[in-house]
Image (cartoon, grey):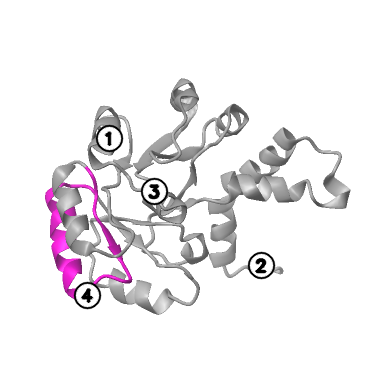
Amino acid sequence: MTVYLSSPKSQMHCAALTDMPVLLSFANWHPFVSTYQTAFSRVMLDSGAFSEFNSGKMIDLTAYRDWSEPWRNRADAIAGLDDIRGDWHKSLANYAAIPWGFPTFHDSDPAELLPDLVAMAQARQTWLGIGLVPPRHGKEHFLRRTFDCIPQELHIHLFAGREYVGIERVNSTDSTDWWLTALRLRGIAELKHLTPAECLEIVIKRYKRWNRKMEMQNENLNLFD
């Protein structure tokens, strides 16, 4: 299971992400990131539609297509431009305009749409995204029911779904708050002596050891064995 750390916002962030999986967002793209991208272990691309929804702006479909096209043979996967406002008809039109992008099924979409998106993902030999409308808590039943309808060969990316990484069917997710966590660390009295870069280093160690943490949680260890 891979956790992609989303949208580095400074060169310090980029330097901290050396050898880490990174999600690059079109909505939050900074040109300086291109000088660091070869240092990232893995890269996936996203339109940043949710960020734009919060700001009231719209993603330009043509601009996103032109930006993502050069990454086709370099990124793990590229997300299609979905309509975060819930117009799934518009999402389908956007997916058609960027044939290398993977589709996303939202819990606000009609259940009848899922087979069509699964077929699209299979035809493109790519991933299938799952998106949850906030608040995202308490949706494990929906996820498990949805996963039961998705063929095993498809890679499932759960957007901003780190709390559900214990579900085996989740192949990858992304973290949008990793750099905010680093900022919060400096607010702890005992850690005020740390620099922002040192706080980032602590957070990155957490993610580097995430898979091992999950393995330990799933083991039934007997102290006396």
x and y percentages locating residue 39 in the rendered image:
49, 25
Gap in Å between the C-alphas at discs 2 and 4? 48 Å
Circle 1 or circle 4, nearest the eye: 1
The amino acid type of the residue labelled 4 equals: Ala
Q: Earlier in the sequence, mark 3 or mark 1?
A: 3
Gap in Å between the C-alphas at discs 3 and 2? 58 Å
Bounds of the magenta segment? 101-126
Front position in the image: 108 or 157: 108
SS for callout 3 = loop
Front position in the image: 44 or 125: 44
Marks 4 and 3: in contact by CB < 8 Å?
no
- Mark seen at residue 63: 1
Is disc 1 surrounded by few (<14), some (14 to 19) or many (20+) residues within 10 Å?
few
Left or right, 119 with reference to 64? left
Q: Earlier in the sequence, mark 1 or mark 4?
A: 1
Residue at x 31% of width, y 30% of height: 74
